[in-house]
Amino acid sequence: MASFERVSPALKEILLKLYRAEKPVEIDHHLYEFGSVEYHVQSSAADPQNNYLSISTPLLSQGAMPSYGLSSYSTQMVKQVCSDAVEIVEPAKEGYQLTLKINFAKIPRGKDYFKVITQISSVQAVILCSQLKEMLRNVNSQDTSQGKNKPIKLVYHPREPFYVIRQPQKITAVFPLRFKEHSDVIIATAFFQELMDVGSSEKWAKAPPCTWSPIPPPELRGEPLEDLSTNGGFVSFEISSRHVEDKKLDKTVWSLLNFYAYVKKHVKCTRGFIQRRMQKRLESLVEVLHKEKLEEKEDVKFKGKVFRPFMLLQTKLKKRTRASSILLHTEASDDASYVFINSGLRNS
């Protein structure tokens, strides 16, 4: 999965072109992005200063959010991010949750214009983050009307949902993990086990406690079977009030929304590391074979016989293979995937 970005690069490029255009531009453009997000940009040559941006984004949770449109909290967050050059149009255009009217004449002409347009291009991320913030900011709430202990399914990508469970004095976030390749499952499992060990250390005592299990946690009992069918297990984080205080709330929300991307990036990088190390070991073994073959051709014949150091070659190869395995174990001891590397060498 691609990392969830705060700013839409494509939308930012379109808005910059409109702002920098020397002549009025007639545009009616639809833009689609990751997570079923749609932007509709409209600009008329008859009214070049007023441009319209409509946004359609799936709600994180159909049960905890309004059936259509944005909550008052999300609308407030959008107003805080946007400058005086942006006005929220109510009601939004049909088929969209939010419509903004952008007046380019009110955007400063100095270096600040780039910052303002960047903020406008981040509106979809603001909407998405505000929905999760609304759930997490009342972690100590004793209100049971919102379904305490009942999992809330959050979806910003159809194939990668996760759950939030409100519990007394804490909120638990649960991520079901799925991978296409069996080797990715091995790497991810080793990573999660290492993550639990590191998270339980005194150094990371203030971080949200992390647990991994190959089976669904008790909190997800009763959820649809298709949502609980995984090959990578379930990762859970316990979020308390200290993790959502002030600026920590932004960091916590951003970490949760990007957790899937972080895991898959780690798996991809680890797989690349394994492949590079094994390729280097293979090249070194081929070099040994080639060197011994050249030496064999230069053997001196004694009394009609040729001395062929085949046994010597076998002995050297065994020593080098054993040394390579030990070296890999040492170099990758901090990486949870060294077992996979050594098993690959033994099977080769």
Image: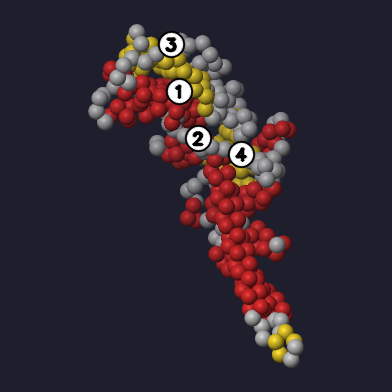
- Left or right of 235, for residue 222: right
Residue annotated with mark 1: 74
User: What amino acid is found at the position of numbered circle 2 in the picture?
Assistant: Phe
Q: Earlier in the sequence, mark 3 or mark 4?
A: 3
Residue annotated with mark 3: 90
Residue annotated with mark 4: 175
Q: Position of residue 16 (x, y in %)?
A: 36, 25
Q: CA distance from mark 4 to mark 1?
A: 24 Å
Residue annotated with mark 2: 4
Residue 59 can be seen in this image: no
Residue 103 can be seen in this image: yes
**What is the crowding at mark 2: few (fewer than 14 residues within 10 Å), some, or many (at least 20)?**
some
User: What amino acid is found at the position of numbered circle 3 in the picture?
Assistant: Glu
Q: Earlier in the sequence, mark 2 or mark 1?
A: 2
Q: Position of residue 81 (x, y in %)?
A: 37, 26
Residue at horizontal 71%, vertical 30%? 224
Q: Position of residue 49 (x, y in %)?
A: 32, 14
Q: Nearer the viewer, residue 136 or 287?
A: 287
Q: Nearer the viewer, residue 108 or 167?
A: 108
**Which numbered disc, 1 or 3, marks the residue closer to the eye?**
3
Q: Is residue 298 above or below residue 18?
A: below
User: What amino acid is found at the position of numbered circle 1 in the picture?
Assistant: Ser
Q: CA distance from mark 2 to mark 3?
A: 28 Å
- Please, what secondary structure does the residue beneath circle 1 have? helix
The residue furthest left is 110
The image quadrant where one finds the C terminus is bottom right
The image quadrant where one finds the N terminus is top right
- Please, what secondary structure does the residue beneath circle 4 have? strand
Q: Earlier in the sequence, mark 1 or mark 3?
A: 1
